[in-house]
């Protein structure tokens, strides 16, 4: 699951206690349904590299700061998951003690088999790649059944539904459709990677964390994106 950093906040708050409680409980319910969960989280509630003053702050520096922000968010979410009774661990491209251990595919798969919820922090470990790309990469590395992306709208629209009342939501798209229409689902690298490897993606509204359960049960409105 790909979550934006804003999913942890509320209003002008970087972190919402009530929101985090609801999110961790929804993840716990998902695990109880027998689903193995891996989460890639952004850092938009703390810092956005692309919004930094790049005339002063080097882009590489900005991206590295953003990756640090994802580690901070992962640590907060991990502790809420643990408080809800789950086993949770943070993996990042490079070990950052005491918060994370270094990502290795075999380690990740073993932990998931042991019932851990994994939080993949630190992006890909490289500048110029977004957490969308990290989500696509980790989903493929752990052989996920699907990549689900929690956003603030209930799927992919032909135009911004917040600005256009006549915006139309797609129930299903191919990756070719996404690229041809230039739909802002994920960044181009992530979309291309999922398309090449046939990784299905579901985009849904996570503003109500209970929608995660509905997504797993197949009753949540959203948009499926597949190779064909």
Image (tube, grey):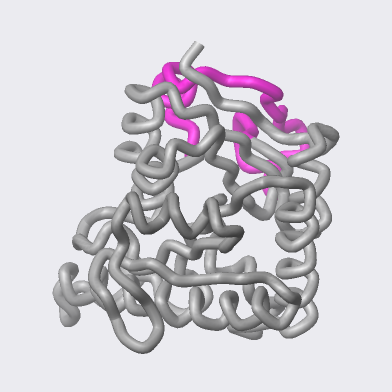
Q: How many marks?
A: 0
Q: Is residue 75 visible?
A: yes
Depicted 183 relative to depicted 177: above or below: below
Q: Nearer the viewer, residue 95 or 73?
A: 95
Q: Nearer the viewer, residue 168 or 127?
A: 127
Q: Residue at x 19, y 79 (%)?
A: 57
Point out the residue furthest to the top here. 228
Residue 187 visible (yes or no): no
Q: Give the camera-side residue of 55 and 132.
A: 132
The answer to which image quadrant residue 60 occupies is: bottom left
Percent position (x, y) of residue 85? 73, 75
Q: Is residue 6 left or right of residue 197?
A: right
Q: Is 13 situated left or right of 71 in this image?
A: right
Which quadrant of the view contains residue 88? bottom right
Q: Is residue 171 magenta?
A: yes
Query: Relative to 210, is 89 on the left or the right?
Result: left
Magenta-colored stretch includes residue 213: no
Residue shown at 20%/61% (left/top)? 126
User: Residue 33 location, x and y as percent?
Assistant: 78, 47
Residue at the location (31% across, 86% down)? Answer: 97
Residue 62 pos. (x, y %): 25, 74
Q: Taking 20 as reference, is 30 above or below it?
A: above
The residue positioned 53% from the left and 69% from the top of the image is 5
What are the residue bounds of the magenta stretch? Answer: 156-184
């Amino acid at each position: 699951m790909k979550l934006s950093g804003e999913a942890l906040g509320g209003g002008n708050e970087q972190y919402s206690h009530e929101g985090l409680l609801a999110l961790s409980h929804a993840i716990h319910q998902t695990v109880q349904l027998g689903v193995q969960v891996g989460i890639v989280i952004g850092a938009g509630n703390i810092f956005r590299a692309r919004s930094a003053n790049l005339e002063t702050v080097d882009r590489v520096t900005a991206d590295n700061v953003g990756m640090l922000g994802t580690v901070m968010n992962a640590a907060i979410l991990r502790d809420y998951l643990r408080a809800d009774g789950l086993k949770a661990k943070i993996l990042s491209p490079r070990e950052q003690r005491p918060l994370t251990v270094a990502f290795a595919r075999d380690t990740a798969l073993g932990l998931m088999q042991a019932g851990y919820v994994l939080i993949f922090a630190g992006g890909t470990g490289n500048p110029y790649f977004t957490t969308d790309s990290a989500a696509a990469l980790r989903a493929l590395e752990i052989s996920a059944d699907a990549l689900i992306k929690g956003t603030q709208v209930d799927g992919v629209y032909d135009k911004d539904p917040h600005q256009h009342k006549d915006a139309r939501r797609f129930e299903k798209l191919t990756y070719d459709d996404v690229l041809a229409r230039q739909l802002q689902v994920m960044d181009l690298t992530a979309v291309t990677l999922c398309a090449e490897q046939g990784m299905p993606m579901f985009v849904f509204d996570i503003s109500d964390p209970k929608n995660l359960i509905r997504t797993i049960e197949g009753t949540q409105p959203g948009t499926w994106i597949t190779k064909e």
